[in-house]
Image: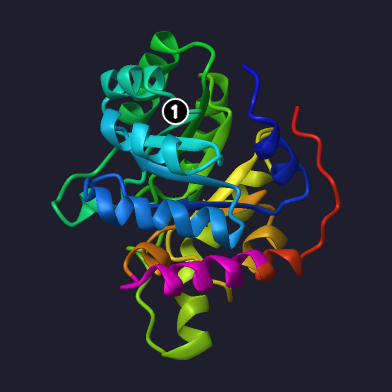
């Protein structure tokens, strides 16, 4: 597996920013706006649903690496054939509201199946936040052994902020920050901290050991492309304030 050079560089200096349009977002106009904002704002890569037409659309309007997300391995085959640069098992947040959860054995099985189908593609896998922290760490180690090249954390839907403003933003990010801290200490691959991350907490994520952050609703739910671009730029600037000590991910 050869990771895209853009990703390698960003992960090495802990400044990777993934902009997520949403695993269940098939609104072409919204996806296009998110992708354009990611490029103009200076993001590292984009993450869209594993849909052939969306992949073609994204590839036609951006030079950024395009990641596709799904929880069904077969969907990755057509998306990769259409030009996707990397794949992500996860972005589970959208399923929790439906009462759909993902246990460790299922995530591990999905990873093994996907890796068998696509042995060369860069593979990112999300560790479900519904697991206890020690179980998240254990699963992350098993996922890397099964072929995961990037581990993503989550936790936005499990946090219950009780304050507004900056304190509320920190409270919202606490579960995914804790997971990034614990997991980054036991795996040799980049850890991407996602779910509930903002420009306030992005520097905390990299300080905790993450090689970058993934941000979705803080960008894709904005109602104008100008606002989306501003949000991406604020995240890029926040990450630029962090320690850039290089890390060589084996």
| Percent of width and height locating residue 230 | 52, 73
Which one is in front, 100 or 40? Answer: 40
Query: Regarding mark 1 in the picture, which secondary structure is present there?
Result: loop
First to last magenta residue range: 222-236
> For this view, does 206 lie left or right of residue 220?
right
| On screen, residue 123 above or below 58 | above
The single residue placed furthest to the right in the displayed view is: 245
- 232 part of magenta stretch: yes
- Write the residue at 31% across / 46% down: 92
Whether 55 is drawn above or below 93: the answer is above
- Graded by Cα atoms within 10 Å as few (under 14), some (14 to 19) or many (20 or more), the crowding at tag 1 reads many
Q: Which residue extends farthest front?
A: 60
Residue 67 percent coordinates (x, y): 46, 36
The residue tagged 1 is: 84
Name the residue rendered at 65%, 20% in the picture. Answer: 2
Residue 206 in percent (x, y) is at 68, 58
Q: Is residue 77 above or below residue 227?
A: above
Choose between 84 and 193: the one closer to the eye: 84
């Amino acid at each position: 597996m050869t990771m895209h050079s853009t990703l390698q560089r960003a992960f090495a200096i802990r400044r990777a920013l993934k902009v997520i349009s949403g695993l269940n977002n098939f609104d072409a106009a919204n996806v296009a706006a998110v992708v354009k904002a990611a490029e103009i704002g200076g993001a590292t890569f984009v993450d869209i649903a594993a849909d052939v037409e969306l992949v073609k659309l994204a590839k036609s309007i951006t030079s950024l690496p395009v990641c596709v997300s799904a929880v069904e391995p077969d969907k990755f085959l057509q998306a990769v054939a259409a030009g996707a640069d990397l794949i992500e098992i996860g972005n589970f947040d959208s399923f929790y509201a439906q009462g759909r959860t993902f246990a460790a054995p299922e995530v591990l099985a999905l990873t093994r199946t996907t890796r068998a189908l696509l042995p060369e593609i860069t593979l990112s896998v999300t560790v479900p936040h519904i697991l206890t922290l020690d179980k998240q760490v254990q699963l992350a180690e098993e996922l890397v052994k099964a072929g995961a090249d990037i581990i993503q954390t989550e936790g936005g839907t499990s946090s219950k902020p009780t304050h507004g403003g900056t304190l509320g933003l920190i409270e919202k990010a606490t579960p995914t920050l804790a997971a990034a801290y614990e997991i980054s200490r036991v795996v040799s691959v980049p850890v991407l901290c996602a779910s509930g991350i903002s420009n306030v907490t992005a520097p905390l994520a990299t300080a905790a050991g993450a090689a970058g952050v993934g941000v979705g609703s803080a960008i894709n739910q904005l109602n104008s492309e100008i606002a989306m671009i501003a949000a991406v730029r604020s995240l890029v600037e926040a990450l630029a304030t962090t320690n850039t000590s290089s890390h060589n991910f084996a």
